[in-house]
Image (cartoon, rainbow, N blue to C red):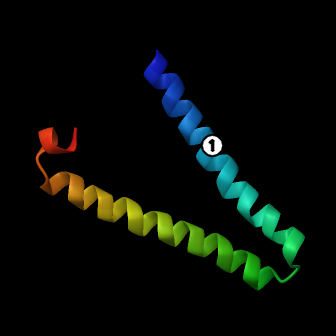
Amino acid sequence: MLRDLQTAAANLSDGVVFVAIPLLATSLTKDAFLIAGLAAMYSAVRLIVVVTVGVYVDRVDRRAIL
């Protein structure tokens, strides 16, 4: 039960951040290209980090990680 709530909270906060970053960027600039670029870079960085960490976790002994 607690793990489900933690997962739900993490997913909700990810969604809020994903929406909030472009909204905050609109307060700094009105250029749609820059706002879209910021959102794309945020997604690209997260993708690169997730893939890199996933490869690391798959190759290292579980006991060493825990």
Residue pictured at 55% horizontal, 67% vertical: 43
Q: Residue 62 in the image: state x and y as whole percent.
A: 15, 42
Residue pictured at 11% horizontal, 47% vertical: 61
Crowdedness near tag 1: few (<14), some (14–19) or many (≥20) residues, C-alpha within 10 Å: few
How many marks the image carries: the answer is: 1
Residue pictured at 86% horizontal, 74% vertical: 28
Q: Amino acid at mark 1?
A: Ser
Residue pictured at 85% horizontal, 70% vertical: 26
Decide if residue 26 is on the left or right side of residue 48: right
Q: Residue 45 in the image: state x and y as whole percent.
A: 49, 70
Q: Residue 51 in the image: state x and y as whole percent.
A: 33, 63
Question: Mark 1 highlights which residue?
Answer: 13
Identify the image quadrant of the C terminus: top left
User: Which SS class for mark 1?
Assistant: helix
Q: Nearer the viewer, residue 63 or 52?
A: 63
Decide if residue 29 is on the left or right side of residue 35: right
In the displayed structure, 18 sits above or below 40; it is above
Q: Residue 65 in the image: state x and y as whole percent.
A: 21, 44
In the displayed structure, 4 sits above or below 35; it is above
